[in-house]
Image (cartoon, coloured by chain):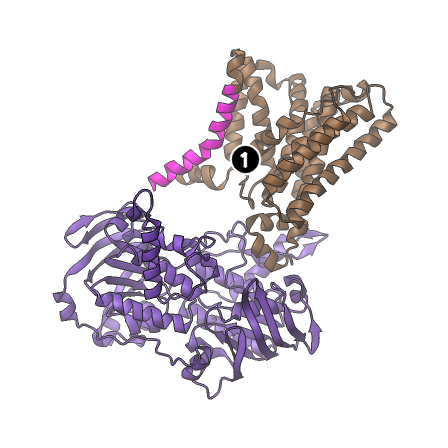
Amino acid sequence: MTISLSARNVAKRYGAVTALSDANLDIRSGEVLALIGANGSGKSTLSKIINGVVVLDGGQLLVDDRPVHFQSPHAAKSLGISTVFQELSLVPQMTVAENIFLTREPLRGGLVDRGAVRQKTEQLLALFAGMFKTDLTPDTPVGPLPPDEKQIIEILKAVSFNPRLLILDEATASLDSRQVQRLFELVVRWKEEGKAIVFVSHRMEEIFQIADRYTVLRNGATVGEGPMQGVTTRDLVGMMVAGVTAENVVHRARPTAEELAARKVTLDVKDLRAEAVHGVSFQLHEGELLGLGGLRGQGQHQLLLALFGDIRHSGNITIDVTPVHFTHPRQAMENRLALVPGERAKEGLLLIRSILENFLIPSWRRYGFPLRIGKARQEATNVSMSLNLKMAGLDAPVSSLSGGNAQKVVIGKWLLRNPRILMLDDPTKGIDVGAKAEFYKLLAQLCGEGKSVLLYSSDDEELIGLSDRVLVMHDGSIRTELIGESLTKSNLVAASLGATQEALP
Amino acid sequence: MIRHSWRRLTNQNRIPFALVLLAVVLLVNFMLQPNLLEPATMNSSMRIFLPLILVAVGQTIVILAGGIDISAGAIVSITNAILATQIGTRGDTGTAMLMMLAVLFVGMAAGAVNGFFVAILRLQPIITTYATSFLFGGLALLILPSPGGGMPSTFTSFYRETRPLGIPLAFFIIALIMLAWYGIRQTRYGRYLFAVGGNADAAYQTGVPVNMVQFSTYMISGLMAAFGGIAITLLTGSGNAQIGDSLTLAAITAVVIGGTALSGGSGTIAGAIIGAIILSLLPNLISFANIETWWQTFLNAAIIVIALALPGFMNLLRRRRT
């Protein structure tokens, strides 16, 4: 089962936008190649050219030293190339088993052999045994599953082809640390079996843990490649962001518990209960950056939604001194709360509409009747400049932006409303290092202005680096509060896995 | 527990809703017309319902795969016009059989035209098939400018009176369709239908031949419309180039009442058949209720609107409660 694949001088244009100009990549059986680059550098496009979803405009693909020309994903699959897609390729109405074996259903007498499908699916699910929070069976519909389980099914679907080359495009972005470790154990096993694996990720620690070699893309061209041995994060980031050194975490003076207690409480939550949230109490202070940590899917998402009035909840919530109970996000907005959702494309943006419109959606009311478009445009321009938004113009569609810039639009639209309490739901998921650094600076600046920030992040480094205090959630309640000396990575990981306050050093 | 099953009934599993509706409509109809379930009445009802059932089945396939076919009724009209002019009341059996076979190909060809525009040129299904409906309707009028023509009485009486084992012919056809559908669901093609309707991009990335699946659904819809055209010609024994017009929207309504999502990816043939029967029983029910003529259309429409809105209201109540 050996394979070698080379991309030579690959180019791809979408209209006036050049996605790839000179991309090169080599991979062989038995190795894990990290494909690295900032958002918009062309990683996804290159992956899609290798797996046949996108047809290249120039350059050449060689499989086993023979030139190939993929016109469809099917052509790539027949050569043993399989992909875990970043935007999942699952059909929500179909079951786990139906999704995994779509187009390759085992047949008996021309009909789909359901027994065999189920059995094979169970074998695959066993690879991630114990990693599912729901009772997952082959006959479960995929639609309502949490994102991490969908991601695992997407991985199993790609693996079920028994591919020679497997592309993992941001496959770990929605997985928690346990699930990532299991995936890596499997990757090592597949590598030994002779599979070649292309690993696309933004998480440096994961790249260093699993990859044998790296290829760095910048602005659509390969700017560096080599063995992982001997390179440092600084080297790689240096290649990704030419001329800019990595200053990806903002170091702020952390207030002590006493200092925090002396500040004004802007948000006081007592015994909040909602779907997947079982009695949460905490206080958020003026100018505080409060982190929410824990494994994925422990109620953090629902906690933020409940605070924003998006889902039904009970409990006492006080903003400043006024008790509130929001039953609609509009009420939360009137009280100057803002929620930046995690799934940008789905919850935060109207992709085909212009950047201007996306900025102004929550704020149109301010511009009267008839709308004072000039003033609105001016304010949107100011925000986009303060965010350092890289765009063709305010009238370009949001879909033309890279992930990091699109996320800036989501935040910018709330900043236009001048919120006092900013809640963020895993905002840096899938954003490159350069954009993250800017984003961290922005958060620090907002806190400096006296705004309170409630940040949920699945990136532990980020929580530790940014937060004044971290509340670790487990199974819908706050298990541990980490502050000052106790705010360390090892404590955060231990608490995430369910260790209580007393058990921590 | 009760609440759980209630929820399933109203939400996850929407055929039972159509079944409940069918039971209600049948019950009311039965009270107004006690001979409703007698074999002779049933036979005469079912042969009237059959054309709509056939068109609704074809429509379900298209909608399942994420499309819609507004031209199905016009295809019925074309086949009716061809049969009525080419066979005629004095036509011999051989010609009649040949013509019936020929219109099946005409139906598929019309479907292929739709499929070409929608699947290959990637035009909006609703607009495209609305446009082609005029194309097909216009052709029907060219073939048969004014109502006339017909079928030999041997054929119409065969359609009217055949009752194998005392059971109306329509039930055998429905059974055949259900059997074929069950078979199709066990094939890869069956899976592809649901995958394409559920998430076409995902299906494409997985290697499903999305274009071919979409193309084929329009051909199936054309074929089923042609069958519907044959049935309606046998039923009326005459030709009318606008006979199919009312079937298009009725079939789409039947599909929706039957619990198939207009967005594609989920639904059943059985639901569409039940929906078509419900829709067909309504005028029956209203006429037997001795309602003044000018109320009939309004009442018929009101019942359809309520039937369509009911699941939505139930969902709203459910959302309020939890």
Residue furthest to the bottom in view is A230
* Residue A168 position (above or below residue A112): below
Which secondary structure type mostly characterizes the magenta part of the structure? helix
Whether residue B231 sits left or right of residue A172 in the image: it is right
Q: Where is residue A73 in the image (x, y as percent from the top left)?
A: 63, 62
Q: Quadrant of residue A197?
A: bottom right
Which lettered chain is shown in purple?
Answer: A
Residue at 30% from the left image edge and 73% from the top image edge: A464
Looking at the picture, which amino acid does disc 1 mark? Val
Which lettered chain is shown in brown?
Answer: B
Residue at 61% from the left image edge and 73% from the top image edge: A10
Whether residue B129 sits left or right of residue A470 in the image: it is right
Q: Position of residue A119 (x, y in %)?
A: 59, 59
* Residue A377 position (above or below residue B310): below
Q: Give the range drawn in magenta.
A: B298-322
* Residue A93 position (above or below residue B30): below
Q: Is residue B283 visible?
A: yes
Is residue B311 found inside the magenta-colored segment of the image? yes
Whether residue B6 sits left or right of residue B233 in the image: it is left
Residue at 71% from the left image edge and 25% from the top image edge: B241
Q: Is residue A146 visible?
A: no
* Residue A307 position (above or below residue B179): below
Residue furthest to the front in view is A374
Q: Is mark 1 on a helix, strand or loop?
A: helix
Q: Position of residue A84 (x, y in %)?
A: 54, 65
Residue corresponding to mark 1: B256
Residue at 59% from the left image edge and 59% from the top image edge: B205
In front here: A159 or B112? Answer: B112
Q: In which quarter of the image is residue B138?
A: top right
Name the quarter where the C terminus of chain A is drawn.
Answer: bottom left
Is residue A75 found inside the magenta-colored segment of the image? no
